[in-house]
Image (cartoon, rainbow, N blue to C red):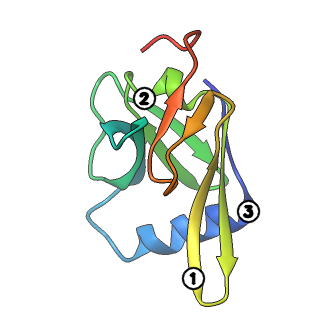
């Protein structure tokens, strides 16, 4: 599985993780949601399960569950700063459409779910 994290996103996630000493990693995943099908989930992971994949990015650990793996394969996680707002942006090659508000997305038929 391939995920990339830009330097800005990496630093942002490391800073967020440092504020939660009980967490050992960031959990990245997807959930069924919205009008298009899926939404990204970013949370703190206190401990991975036996089936989680742990990815390391310059001192940052990401935990990904097996259901999310094929949906996130090839995704780049970036941090976009617009004025005073900071947003994680996901550049996911599996996405074929997004809802109008940008909160949910659909994947192509070739992605096994």
Q: In which quarter of the image is residue 88?
A: bottom right
Judge the density around disc 3: few (<14), some (14-19), many (≥20) Cα neighbours within 10 Å: some
Taking the spot 31% from the left edge, 70% from the top edge, the residue there is 21
Disc with the residue nearer the chain's start (3 vs 2)? 3
Closest to the camera, between mark 2 and mark 1, is 1
How far separated are the C-alphas under marks 3 and 2?
23 Å
Tell me where residue 109 appears, x and y as whole percent: 55, 11
**Cβ atoms under marks 1 and 3 closer than 8 Å:** no
Outermost residue, front direction?
Answer: 100
Outermost residue, bottom direction?
Answer: 84
Disc with the residue nearer the chain's start (1 vs 3)? 3
Q: At numbered mark 1, what does the secondary structure look like: helix, strand or loop? A: strand
Taking 92 as reference, is 61 above or below it? Answer: below
Residue occupied by mark 1? 85
Taking the spot 69% from the left edge, 31% from the top edge, the residue there is 93
How far separated are the C-alphas under marks 1 and 3?
18 Å
Q: At numbered mark 3, what does the secondary structure look like: helix, strand or loop? A: helix
Q: Indicate the quadrant containing the C terminus: top left, top right, bottom left or bottom right.
A: top left
Tell me where residue 54 appears, x and y as whole percent: 47, 35
Q: At numbered mark 2, what does the secondary structure look like: helix, strand or loop? A: loop
Q: How many labels sit on residues?
A: 3
Which numbered dot is residue 9? none
Disc with the residue nearer the chain's start (2 vs 1)? 2
Residue occupied by mark 2? 68
Taking the spot 68% from the left edge, 30% from the top edge, the residue there is 74
Q: Observer-nearest residue: 60 or 89?
A: 89
Residue occupied by mark 3? 7
**Cβ atoms under marks 3 and 2 closer than 8 Å:** no
**Cβ atoms under marks 2 and 1 closer than 8 Å:** no
Judge the density around disc 2: few (<14), some (14-19), many (≥20) Cα neighbours within 10 Å: some
């Amino acid at each position: 599985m391939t995920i990339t994290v830009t330097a800005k996103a990496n630093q942002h996630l490391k800073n967020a993780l440092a504020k939660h000493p009980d967490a050992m990693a960031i959990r990245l995943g997807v959930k069924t949601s919205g009008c298009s099908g899926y939404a990204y989930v970013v949370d703190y992971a206190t401990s991975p399960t036996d089936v989680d994949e742990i990815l390391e990015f310059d001192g940052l650990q990401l935990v990904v569950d097996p259901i999310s793996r094929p949906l996130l394969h090839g995704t780049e996680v970036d941090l976009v700063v617009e004025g005073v707002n900071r947003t994680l942006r996901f550049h996911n090659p599996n996405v074929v459409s997004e809802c109008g508000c940008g909160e949910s997305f659909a994947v192509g038929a070739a992605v096994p779910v």
